Amino acid sequence: MRRIAALVLSGVGSSLWLTGYGIVSGTTSGTCVDWVHFDTPQDIFNQAGVVVIGKPLSQDGQTSIYGYTAQTHLVKIEKVLKGDTGANTMQISAMPETCTGGVSYPDGDPLETSRRLIIFLTKDDGKWFTFTPAQGVLSFDNGTALPFHQ
């Protein structure tokens, strides 16, 4: 078995570095994403293109990204804090973790909740995803101050 050259994608304001790999011994291949870690909610807000306050209503199918299954949720949008969604409800998929042996959410799906959330969004191939698997959502109770400046 031998590794094939890695592909690294990055850019100004990008939220990830993408490393592709393939193993020459049949049909095994995959994609691993090393996610940027943001030190503060302000850092995430500054990098995300769209930020909303919303509440997941129900699961709404699945999609795929980086070779992993992403659970899609129907989310009621209460307020747009940054960017434009053009909708009162949105289909948002929770960005899966990668390089986890095929398990999309080893720590649980962050949108599998009935809580009110701040959701940091990115769009890929016309579909909305949480910005990163670990830092794509924050719980946000009524009366709580925003953890960043708009």
Image: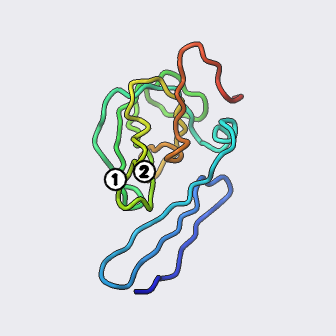
Is residue 85 depicted above or below 115 in this figure? Answer: below
**Residue 50 location in percent, x, y?**
56, 38
Q: Earlier in the sequence, mark 1 or mark 2?
A: 1
Amino acid residing under circle 2:
Pro
Mark number for residue 146?
none
**Residue 141 location in percent, x, y?**
53, 19
For mark 1, does the 10 Å Cα neighbourhood hold few (<14), some (14 to 19), or many (20 or more) residues? many
**Residue 9 location in percent, x, y?**
58, 66
Q: Residue furthest top?
A: 143
Residue drawn at (49%, 47%), measured in percent from left and top? 133
For mark 2, does the 10 Å Cα neighbourhood hold few (<14), some (14 to 19), or many (20 or more) residues? many
Residue drawn at (45%, 53%), measured in percent from left and top? 97
Relative to 26, 132 lies left or right: right
Front residue (pair 64, 86): 64
Disc 1 secondary structure class: strand
Relative to 42, 51 lies left or right: left
Colour basis = rainbow
For the C terminus, the quadrant is top right
Q: Quickly name the residue at label 1.
A: 69
Amino acid residing under circle 1:
Thr
Residue drawn at (31%, 30%), measured in percent from left and top? 58
Do residues under tags 1 and 2 come within 8 Å of each other at their CB atoms?
A: yes
Is residue 6 depicted above or below 107 in this figure? Answer: below
Q: Residue furthest right?
A: 149
For the N terminus, the quadrant is bottom left
Relative to 29, 41 lies left or right: right
Q: Residue furthest front?
A: 107
User: Splitting the image into 4 quarters, where does residue 10 fall?
Assistant: bottom right
Q: Quickly name the residue at label 2.
A: 96
Residue drawn at (55%, 42%), measured in percent from left and top? 135
Label 1, label 2: how far apart the Cα atoms are: 7 Å
